[in-house]
Image (spheres, grey):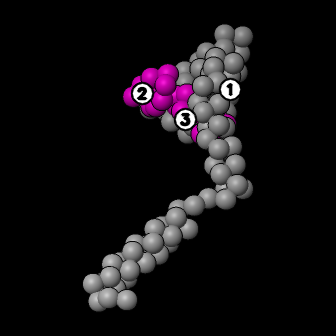
């Protein structure tokens, strides 16, 4: 073996071991790949579900009312049949969140928040 070929051999061994370590570090087995794909598909599914099938719009309306009046409603402001009946709004925080997201990002933002919270 000549002296000139020795550094090339060391260099090629070093790059091979580096490549191998990167490959091992960033490789995924089948269980990890299937799990990642499952979560990605689940997120894309819930991100594209039509949100008119839900009562999300009622929550957005309540949130807008709470933000506009800076207080929780004592009586239900949207249900005419329950006029004068006291109500307890237990979901006020999520309603305010939905109203703020809808005001800032529109239906697309609301769809993403809905996908994350469902």
- The residue that disc 2 covers is 105
Q: Which marked residue is nearer to the observer: mark 2 or mark 1?
A: 2
Q: Is residue 114 visible?
A: no
Q: Quadrant of the C terminus?
A: top right
Percent from the top left, x then y, of residue 107? 49, 22
Label 3, secondary structure: give it: helix
Binning the other alpha carbons within 10 Å of mark 2 as few (below 14), some (14 to 19) or many (20 upward) gives few
Residue lying at 65% horizontally and 51% vertically, measured from the top left = 33
Q: Main secondary structure of the magenta part?
A: helix
Label at residue 19: none
Do callouts 1 and 3 mark residues in contact (Cβ within 8 Å)?
A: no
Earlier in the chain: of badge 1 and badge 3, it is: 1
Q: Nearer the viewer, residue 22 or 3?
A: 3
Residue lying at 34% horizontally and 85% vertically, measured from the top left = 6
Residue lying at 67% horizontally and 59% vertically, measured from the top left = 29
Residue lying at 63% horizontally and 20% vertically, measured from the top left = 50
Label 2, secondary structure: give it: helix
Q: Nearer the viewer, residue 11 or 20?
A: 11
Label 1, secondary structure: give it: loop
Q: CA distance from mark 2 to mark 1?
A: 32 Å
The residue stretch that appears in magenta: 98-118
- The residue that disc 3 covers is 113
Where is 92 relative to 82, above or below? Answer: below
Percent from the top left, x then y, of residue 47? 59, 30
Is residue 74 shown left or right of residue 105? right
Q: Is residue 61 visible?
A: yes
- The residue that disc 1 covers is 86
Percent from the top left, x then y, of residue 46? 64, 31
Q: CA distance from mark 1 to mark 3?
A: 30 Å
């Amino acid at each position: 073996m000549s002296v000139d070929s020795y550094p090339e051999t060391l260099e090629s061994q070093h790059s091979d071991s580096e490549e191998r370590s990167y490959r091992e570090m960033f490789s995924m087995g089948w269980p990890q790949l299937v799990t990642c794909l499952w979560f990605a598909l689940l997120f894309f599914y819930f991100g594209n579900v039509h949100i008119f099938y839900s009562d999300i719009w009622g929550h957005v309306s309540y949130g807008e009312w709470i933000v506009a009046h800076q207080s929780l409603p004592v009586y239900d402001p949207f249900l005419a049949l329950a006029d004068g009946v006291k109500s307890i709004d237990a979901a006020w925080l999520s309603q305010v969140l939905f109203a703020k997201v809808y005001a800032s990002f529109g239906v697309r933002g609301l769809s993403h928040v809905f996908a994350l919270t469902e």
